[in-house]
Amino acid sequence: MHCSTTGAPRLFPGCQDGAVSSPTLDAPEAGLDDEQLAAVTAPRGPVCVLAGAGTGKTRTITRRIAHLVRTGHVAPGQVLAVTFTARAAGEMRTRLRTLGVAGVQARTFHAAALRQLRYFWPRVVGGDQWQLLDGKLRLVGQAAARAKAGTDAASLRDLAGEIEWAKASLVAPDGYAAAVAKLRRDTPGPAEQVAQVYAGYEALKNNAELLDFDDLLLHTAAALEEHAGVAEEFRDRYRCFVVDEYQDVTPLQQRVLDAWLGDRDDLTVVGDANQTIYTFAGASPRHLLEFPRRFPEAVVVRLQRDYRSTPQVVACANSLIGAARGRVAGTRLQLVGQLPPGPEPDFSEHDDEPAEAAAVAAQIKRLVADGTPASEIAVLFRINAQSEVYEQALTEIGVPYQVRGGERFFSRAEVRRAMTAIRTAAGRGETEGAPLVDAVRAVLVPVGLTPEPPGGAAQRAQWESLLGLVELAEELVAVEPEADLRRFSVELETRADAAHPPTVQGVTLASLHAAKGLEWDVVFLVGLVDGTLPIQHADGDDDAIEEERRLLYVGVTRARRRVLLSWALSRQPGGPRRRRRSRFLYGLIPDEHPASRIANGRGRGGAKPRCRVCGSPLLGTDALKLRRCGDCPSDVDVELLDRLRGWRSGEAKEQQVPAYVVFTDATLTAIAEQRPCDNAALVRIPGVGARKLDRYGPAVLALVAESDGGES
């Protein structure tokens, strides 16, 4: 039975590390910088390596293992090194072989647990070993049907993902509702119903004597915790442990690691809290950051020399992460670029998304013509639905591309279903005479298009794809005002045919999550507007906002030589220019750069926003919303704020969502302080995007006008 990464967070740890010189079989210590050498030669015992992007972490930890083996501290077979993907584990084994160290067990957490559970099963359970469940959707579907939850493919994927999060977080079905309420977690349905699906799934699985991938970890931990003989035998076999990407361990994985260790401390961990981007799957940097507290005698080494990127890219990354809120000491890695200088980061603002994509495609074509291989160029975005406009733009100018970590837009199941529905409706003459955009929305409602994005990640991704089709209809109407559903169906078929060139090595299109651990010479970071990065549903949660910042940081640090950042003020040509470039770009854009100007009072460029009371630069989400420092006096209209909160409570109750989903406290306070009198003033307040303006704007402005005595 083969065990890879199924059931674990989809991470892509870095595979190309900086080096001072080539390794030699005779000396694991050769060719290392001072910090790498300190980590490699640290005494046997607890070692924590805080390794920034591009600093040579894999090189360092494999050299450390080789050093421990060569100096007689441990035999190769007594070392267990764990990471998060089969690819990373395989690379670790390959590097160790080139260093002349064979026999080290380098595996994923799940592969290591599966091997151990198979060995110990006869003693701890007895009887025939339970089989490993290939995929949980069938059982989740049965449990969902019994709980009267959604059973479509997207709903089942979201429910399965939520069960994986709960098990990774050590949350049982009977504690699920309380746990998600405490965390204010976005769930794929009512918490009680999800808990019912979770409990039903566990019962079905256990009755069938099946194990899922999370069970491998749970049963392995239990075997070591509850059976002294098993623990003694295991700990006699494995004496030294190494954990890569330690910022991404879940509570369940940490429990397994604790069970492996017992009361020993021969542990080396490597990670970078600045690259924690999977907390939604249960990952937590807490174990990395608290390592020196747990092991006061630990050797802590910081790797900060970046061998991947130019000093200009490194400076951009440092500025971005340096503005993070609530950073603790362990995250303060200041990368130092080691490569020769390169171009400064490029920033560009565009009127609309198609214009942005066309400009990016034109730049890529020039880069390829000038000698940069297409395979060394990447276009990275926050959500997969953003890929379509870049697929189209690259196709139109004949530049090959590949979509990584997801299907091409027109290959997605929900898009194919939607195109079939549109084609059928057009053939039947349905919605005849209705404006095209309204007709498309009406046809897509049964396919899954709702007024607001759904809660689950898979459902939200499908919703975003359907919304992308609506936006294509808006594009067509801007060019052909009389276009109908039949004409739109033809347009979609034409685009779909054009977007399927032969598979070749080309420009990479990928989400920021899928880009983790990869690198290219040139990276385009696109669609950098508030509401997309940070994503709209993160607003109001400071922790979620900071994870979005780390996601952009991961994107910047993928670039070796050049990084280009861009945004568009409108979705469609001729649309309202309501968008604001991402708040994360404040302070990154040089004052002399053309994009640094402020337009229409919205801070469209890179000039640092300043407090309207004291004039100091504003830092932090709440300060940006309020347009004042947190300790500057507030001029809030208390009565208006009370009315706004009452109105919000009613909206939340009607929609059956938490109040912060409507507007966060900070956004309501900003409204009550700034007292917007029209749509333009209201949309300038962060947290009031175009959709919320359309949905809530009239009611909010009416409350403000009422507070002003009707004079506004």
Image (tube, grey):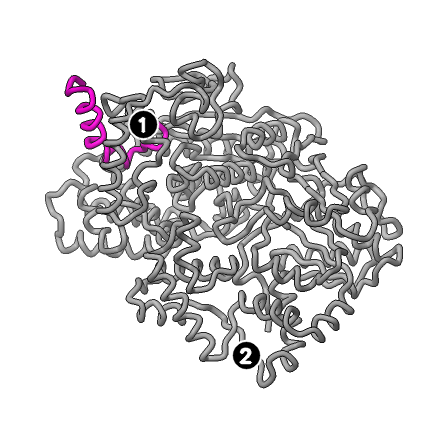
- Kind of residue indicated by mark 2: Trp
Q: Earlier in the sequence, mark 2 or mark 1?
A: 2
Residue 319, image x, y percentages: 58, 27
Residue pictured at 81% horizontal, 42% vertical: 37
> Which quarter of the rendering shows the C terminus?
top left
Q: Quadrant of residue 304?
A: top right
Question: Is disc 2 in contact with disc 1, using a CB cutoff of under 8 Å?
Answer: no
Position above or below: 94 against 349: below
> Which quarter of the rendering shows the N terminus?
bottom right
Residue pictured at 28% horizontal, 23% vertical: 637
Q: Which residues are magenta?
A: 685-712
Kindly identify which residue carries mark 2. 130
Considering the whole magenta stretch, tell me its main secondary structure.
helix
Whether residue 478 appears in this view of the structure is no
**In this orientation, which residue lies closer to the viewer: 449 or 538?**
538
**In this orientation, which residue lies closer to the viewer: 6 or 100?**
6
Whether residue 600 appears in this view of the structure is yes
Kindly identify which residue carries mark 1. 578
Q: Residues within 10 Å of mark 1 (few under 14, many from 20)?
A: some
- Kind of residue indicated by mark 1: Arg
Q: Residues within 10 Å of mark 2 (few under 14, many from 20)?
A: some
Residue 677, image x, y percentages: 23, 21
